[in-house]
Amino acid sequence: MSFGKLAQEYCNVSLPLQVLKSRAGYYIGTFDPESGPCSRESLEYFHTEQDASEALLSGNFTQLSEP
């Protein structure tokens, strides 16, 4: 399981990467059950949840370097 680089660096929390959805589309990020979305980790937005899931599983996404 991979963890969010930006969540760790900027929020000091270790949260697993997962597929999340916003109005712009699906993205790879982190979610804190107590406070909600924490970080967007992927540069890309994906058209479908399946595309985002495949990118997460394969590691085929661009990691953002800053929020």
Image (cartoon, rainbow, N blue to C red):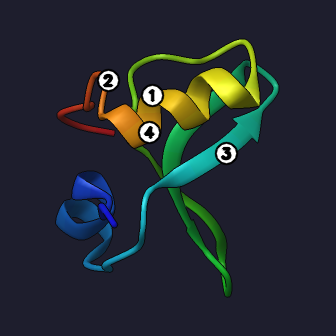
**Circle 3 residue:** 20
**Left or right: where does residue 48 sit relative to residue 57?**
right
Q: Earlier in the sequence, mark 1 or mark 2?
A: 1
Q: Residue flagged by tag 3: what amino acid is it?
A: Leu
Cα–Cα gap, marks 1 and 2: 5 Å
Q: Position of residue 1 (x, y in %)?
A: 34, 67
Residue at 82% over, 25% down: 23
Cα–Cα gap, marks 4 and 3: 11 Å
Cα–Cα gap, marks 4 and 2: 7 Å
Cα–Cα gap, marks 3 and 1: 13 Å
Q: Position of residue 7 (x, y in %)?
A: 33, 63
Eyeballing the image, is 10 above or below 54?
below
Residue at 72% over, 12% down: 47
Label 4 sits on a secondary structure element that is: helix
Question: Few, some or many C-alpha atoms within 10 Å of disc 3 (few <14, some 14-19, many ≥20)?
Answer: some
Q: Residue flagged by tag 4: what amino acid is it?
A: Leu
Mark 4 vs mark 3: give the one in front: 4
Cα–Cα gap, marks 4 and 1: 4 Å
Q: Earlier in the sequence, mark 4 or mark 3?
A: 3
Eyeballing the image, is 14 above or below 56?
below
Question: Few, some or many C-alpha atoms within 10 Å of disc 4 (few <14, some 14-19, many ≥20)?
Answer: some
**Left or right: where does residue 27 sit relative to residue 55?**
right
Looking at the rendered structure, which numbered label has been put on residue 60?
Answer: 2
